[in-house]
Image: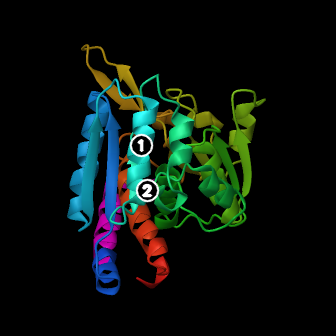
Amino acid sequence: MTTILDGKAVAAALRQEVAARVKRFEARAGRLPGLTVVLVGNDPASEVYVRNKGVQTREAGMISDEVKLPESTSQRDLLNVVARLNADPSVDGILVQMPLPKQIDTQAIIEAIDPLKDVDGLHPVNAGKLAQGMEALTPCTPLGCMILLEKAGVEVAGANALVIGRSILVGRPVAGLLLAGNATVTIAHSRSRDLPALCKQADILIAAVGKPEMVRGEWIKRGAAVIDVGINRVPKNDGKTKLIGDVHYASAVEQAGVITPVPGGVGPMTIACLLQNTLTAACYREKIDPKTL
């Protein structure tokens, strides 16, 4: 029987765990962890996401702050904001909400953030540490994928794992985490040959390619763990839209041993892991081992 992974429930439990650890951090450090989110422009989806981050950060007992900048903000002005936050001792985590307006070089902003405050885990220092198997702040969605696998009791060590997608946001870092967990990892992409055959060999399949329902049920090895990172908004017959993943859920659920739905799977884990990363960043800055909280 297929196990449906309830990302909402796992994320809620993680947020409660973080809140309890925040209290222990406060007792040892004499202060609360602080997260600042920078939002440039007025993208409605980003505004909702940033608002949710603020609510959940405060619910976890941490300090939440937002810096809102106009769409016309220059790269120099945004770099100045990042520099100010880097120097602010009350800020443990900095998250610059993507996407950024076209006049701003996203990579330059990522590289300007202090690696110790990079709770998105995208700075080259953190990416390099992850690639070398070192302890580092890790991108939130890949971290969420690994937590879901752990909660489902999926054995990563020794498993054949296939990651479809090679982005710096999900594909590459989740491959690094799987490799650190002693899986045998293959990364597939747009030029991979015979993708269905690669999928058939995978004990763990992580789809993060951004193509609606590309992965079909008949591609999936029976009993495999399937983590669908895709969030694709497609039209319905009534003129409205719905969210679907990169995996054709109706056929995949017949084959998989464990599977995440869309929505309600990986998505809820992202903010919960952001809270965990903020606490971890605060621990690094206070020379506290996060594992001891």
Residue at 45% in and 34% down: 76
Q: Which residues are magenta?
A: 3-20
Residue labelled with disc 1: 80
Residue 259 or 83: which is nearer the viewer?
83
Q: Height in image: 223 above or below 27?
A: above
Please tell me whether mark 2 sits on a helix, a strand or a loop: helix
The answer to whether residue 156 is visible is yes
Q: Give the residue furthest to the right.
A: 193
The location of residue 66, given as percent across then percent down, is: 26, 47
Residue 74 or 125: which is nearer the viewer?
74
Residue 252 within the magenta-colored segment of the rendering: no
Amino acid type, residue under disc 1 in the picture: Asn
Residue at 25% in and 47% down: 52
The location of residue 170, given as percent across then percent down, is: 56, 45
Q: How busy is the neighbourhood of tag 2: few (under 14 within 10 Å), some, or many (20 plus)? A: many
The answer to whether residue 266 is visible is no
Using the image, tell me which numbered label, if any, was put on residue 86: 2
Q: Height in image: 103 above or below 114?
A: above
* Direction from residue 62 to residue 260 in the image, left or right: right
The location of residue 161, given as percent across then percent down, is: 68, 52
